[in-house]
Amino acid sequence: MPELYRQIQDNKLKSWFFVGFLFILIVATSFFFGILTGMDTPAIIVLAFVLSILLTLGSYHYSDSIVVAATGAKPADEKEYRRLHSLVEGLCIASGIPKPKVYVLEDKAINAFATGRDPQHAVLCVTTGALEKLDKSELEGVIAHEMSHIKNYDMRFMTFAVVMVGIVGLISNIALRSMFWGGGRRDDNRGNAGWILLVIGIIFIILAPIFAKLVQLAVSRKREYLADASGAFLTRYPDGLASALKKIKLESLPVKTASTTTESLFFANPLNASAWNNLFSTHPPIDERIKRLESM
């Protein structure tokens, strides 16, 4: 399965490339913040990175309980959901990670999600729709995808990306407010180069949050491709995962308790998004995911 190994490596490299770009974006935004407000640029850069780390640590530490409460998921009773627990236990042995807490979400849509800051504090949740409509190989493929998110530390990875995007937005917002309300640097003696830099700074500060959001979406999509490839590697049967995606595409049901906040955690886009909104989705197109799986 050479294509599978190539996809895994390619998605890992591109994910880190996008995160690296977010770091550069924070530095550039901090630089122009200093240009526009007259504040010490190095101090702003250091503050931005310290704030990124602190917010990341705080946000993912309680992510599992927050997401479970937000979606309304319930613990999966081992007797009632014996098949689900058996599949999870088998994949845990195969992947070498501890068994996560297993939850069930009462919803007709075929979907699932994983959350938690590391494999030792993970939650895996499957909708009742998935349990009812997927056969063994399809359900195993979906669970393997979510287990791959856990093993690859995707929740931690994506939380960091989300926080960095938030930092860029925060810096840009403060800079624009400072300028509009008279708090910016006032220097009528700046030369032509100074005024050009000022204009560039204003344009960059306005566009930076948009760039950051697009990069975040790119990171999210690459992690989904990576989880697909890793899940297929885990089960050694890509067709099961591809078949599950085909069923999701065919029924196209949204998850009732999903929101834009929890959207990126789900196996497939849980929102009933329009074609336009799909351009800004946290998930890659289902057709492309199926195509890649079938090529393995």
Image: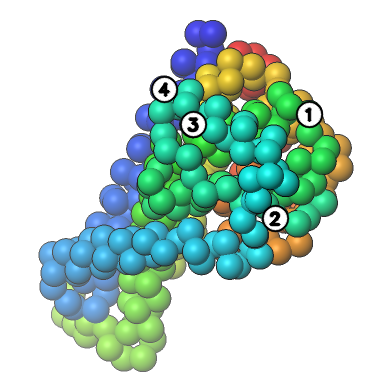
Specify whether 262 is left or right of 61: right
Instruction: Give the structural element (helix, strand or loop) at label 4.
Output: helix
Which residue is disc 4 drawn over?
9
Q: Earlier in the sequence, mark 4 or mark 1?
A: 4
Q: Distance between the residues labelled 2 and 1?
A: 18 Å
Q: Earlier in the sequence, mark 4 or mark 3?
A: 4
Q: Give residue 107's quadrant in the image.
A: bottom right
Question: In the rendered structure, which amino acid carries the disc numbered 1?
Answer: Asp
Q: Distance between the residues labelled 3 and 1?
A: 19 Å
**Residue 40 image offset from top left, x and y in percent:** 13, 73
What quarter of the picture does the C terminus occupy? top right
Which mark's residue is nearer the viewer, 2 or 4? 2
Query: Camera-side residue: 47 or 232?
Result: 232
Question: In the rendered structure, which amino acid carries the disc numbered 4?
Answer: Gln
Question: In the rendered structure, which amino acid carries the disc numbered 3?
Answer: Cys
Which mark's residue is nearer the viewer, 4 or 3? 3
Q: Distance between the residues labelled 3 and 2?
A: 21 Å
Which residue is disc 1 drawn over?
135
Query: Camera-side residue: 152 or 129?
Result: 129
**Residue 41 image offset from top left, x and y in percent:** 16, 68
